């Protein structure tokens, strides 16, 4: 038998002190260790959290707006006679700023290594952080907040943040709605934002009962990470939550932002530019970087994971909406599959320009697109996508760096979205870092090393506006 050692007196006190110190050290190390989970039990009361974050808001937004002004020309300069489907002006011109003393032509002649070593990669081409990357979460433009509040009395205002990109760089609101089943009706939105209050009146007699039920679910509020009933929400009052169509307004997009749910730790997570739902019927991958294989998978994933930053523990706490796959998910997916691209009168059945309708610049741009620009290697007609993921490896051009809480190291594979109707859905790339089509042309000219001339770039923009 082992002999027991009895510790008494000063020795006992010393041993107890060491055990206590060791336990405290363990707690400190555990607290500092990276974790995939958000805290479940909140120790700070809601009023204290709200006051603290409200007090920090001005500084957070000033930092983000300073970054945007450093990167971009944010002025309102609409293109002449070029509008989105319902008439909103399309912004023109390259808005990304270059380093002093460097032209786009000089930059395009350099190798990725030269650009990287000299630190000349335009800052507007670097990953764009969330307005508060350390915090993240769904964040809506003010015009979305105002309309939803007006129709439903549901307030999507966050007390800690405002949306950052100016309205003139965002899609039109309300967006037009085109249906694959009823092209004869044209835009069926009637100039309204579809919500739980008006969906039935707008679509009864146009949709079948399953599709109508799917649309009802798409405009029904459900709890979400920042908008819910708990003490760790980011709305001042307890919230009924958000709807699918708060982000994908009218089955298109209002360009709200978020952070992707499938990357950890927080500094590596990518800002998300909400993509349109138009044309999902011809797509085979869903999510800008998730490569989900069906629209049903995407719909279920959004409710179970994306709504709660990919954390099922928090989802359970805040009120996850478990959709029934065989009926509810199916109905929602069936409606989404009806959302069509806007009409493109200058395109033929094969998605190419009709020479009798297109301008000289558009025809020249089409030639650049399919030849020197190498755009068609990924964006193949008629819908201008190859339904694949592509890794652009833009990190060849810059050194890893921290940008307002976002560690810019790499982007990874990105879904190749269709270019049909592309002028209706700014900003561009998966995180919205490219404000105009001109910015997008300059970005890919540099990434691909195609060395397009100034005129070729202009013609290419004209072609894409016709898609």
Image (cartoon, grey):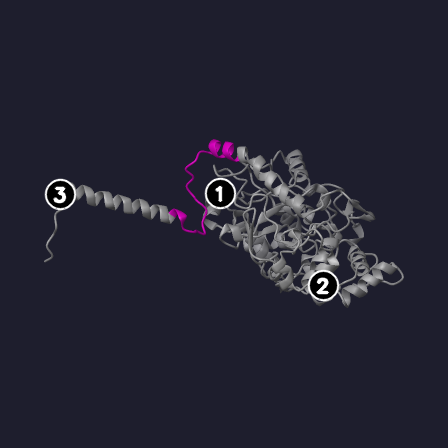
Quadrant in which residue 243 is drawn: top right
Q: Which residue is mark 2?
A: 109
Q: Mark 3 Cα within 10 Å, few/some/many (few <14, many 20+)?
A: few
Q: Mark 1 Cα within 10 Å, few/some/many (few <14, many 20+)?
A: many
Q: Tell me, for residue 8, which label it has, or none.
A: 3
Residue placed at 48% from the left, 35% from the top? 49
Q: Quadrant of the C terminus?
A: bottom right
Q: Give, as a single range, the part of the protein colored magenta.
A: 31-53
Q: Earlier in the sequence, mark 1 or mark 2?
A: 2
Compute the Cα span from label 1 to label 3. Answer: 50 Å
As displayed, is residue 274 above or below residue 372?
Answer: above
Quick check: marks 1 and 2 in contact, CB under 8 Å?
no
Front label number (1 vs 2) = 2
Q: Which residue is mark 1?
A: 318
Residue 50 colored in magenta in the image: yes
The answer to whether any part of residue 237 appears in the image is: no
Q: Earlier in the sequence, mark 1 or mark 3?
A: 3
The answer to whether any part of residue 126 appears in the image is: yes
Q: Position of residue 153 (x, y in %)?
A: 62, 33
Q: Position of residue 18 (x, y in %)?
A: 24, 45
Compute the Cα span from label 1 to label 2. Answer: 53 Å
Q: Earlier in the sequence, mark 2 or mark 3?
A: 3
Seen in the image, is 44 located left or right of residue 170? left
Viewer-closest of 295 and 42: 42
Q: Position of residue 157 (x, y in %)?
A: 60, 36
Q: Residue furthest front?
A: 101
Quadrant in which residue 74 is drawn: top right
Residue 252 colored in magenta in the image: no
Residue placed at 73% from the left, 62% from the top? 384
């Amino acid at each position: 038998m082992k002999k027991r050692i009895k510790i008494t007196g000063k020795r006992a006190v010393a041993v107890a002190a060491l055990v206590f110190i060791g336990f405290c050290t363990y707690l400190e190390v555990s607290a500092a260790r990276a974790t995939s989970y958000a805290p479940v039990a909140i120790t700070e009361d809601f009023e204290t959290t709200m006051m603290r974050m409200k007090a920090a808001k001005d500084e957070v937004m000033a930092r983000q707006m300073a970054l945007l002004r450093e990167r971009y020309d944010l002025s309102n300069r609409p293109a002449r006679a070029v509008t989105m489907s319902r008439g909103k002006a399309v912004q023109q011109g390259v808005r990304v700023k270059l380093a002093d003393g460097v032209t786009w032509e000089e930059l395009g002649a350099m190798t990725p290594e030269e650009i990287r070593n000299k630190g000349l990669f335009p800052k507007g081409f670097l990953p764009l952080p969330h307005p508060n990357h350390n915090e993240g979460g769904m964040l809506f433009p003010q015009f979305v907040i105002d309309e939803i509040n007006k129709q439903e009395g549901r307030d999507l205002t966050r007390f800690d943040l405002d949306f950052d990109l100016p309205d003139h760089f965002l899609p039109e609101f309300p967006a037009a709605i085109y249906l694959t089943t009823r092209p004869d009706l044209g835009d069926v939105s009637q100039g309204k934002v579809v919500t739980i209050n008006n969906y039935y009146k707008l679509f009864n007699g146009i949709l079948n009962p399953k599709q109508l039920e799917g649309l009802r679910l798409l405009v029904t509020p459900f709890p979400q990470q920042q908008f819910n009933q708990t003490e760790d929400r980011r709305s001042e009052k307890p919230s009924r939550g958000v709807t699918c169509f708060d982000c994908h307004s009218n089955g298109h997009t209002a360009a709200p932002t978020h952070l992707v749910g499938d990357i950890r730790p927080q500094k590596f997570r990518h800002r998300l530019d909400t993509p349109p739902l138009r044309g999902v019927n011809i797509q085979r991958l869903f999510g800008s970087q998730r490569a989900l294989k069906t629209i049903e998978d995407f719909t279920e994933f959004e409710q179970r994971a994306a709504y709660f930053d990919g954390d099922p523990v928090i989802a359970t706490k805040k009120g996850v909406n478990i959709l029934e796959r065989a009926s509810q998910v199916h109905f929602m997916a069936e409606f989404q599959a009806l959302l069509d691209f806007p009409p493109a009168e200058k395109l033929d059945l094969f998605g190419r320009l009709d020479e009798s309708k297109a301008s000289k610049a558009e025809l020249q741009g089409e030639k650049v697109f399919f030849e020197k620009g190498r755009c068609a290697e990924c964006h193949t007609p008629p819908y201008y996508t190859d339904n694949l993921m592509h890794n652009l490896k833009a990190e060849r051009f810059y050194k890893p760096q921290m940008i307002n809480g976002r560690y810019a190291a790499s982007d990874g594979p990105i879904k190749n979205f269709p270019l049909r109707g592309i002028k209706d859905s700014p900003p561009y790339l998966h995180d919205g870092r490219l404000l105009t089509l001109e910015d997008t042309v300059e970005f890919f000219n540099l990434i691909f090393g195609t060395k397009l001339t100034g005129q070729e770039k202009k013609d290419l923009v004209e072609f894409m506006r016709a898609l």
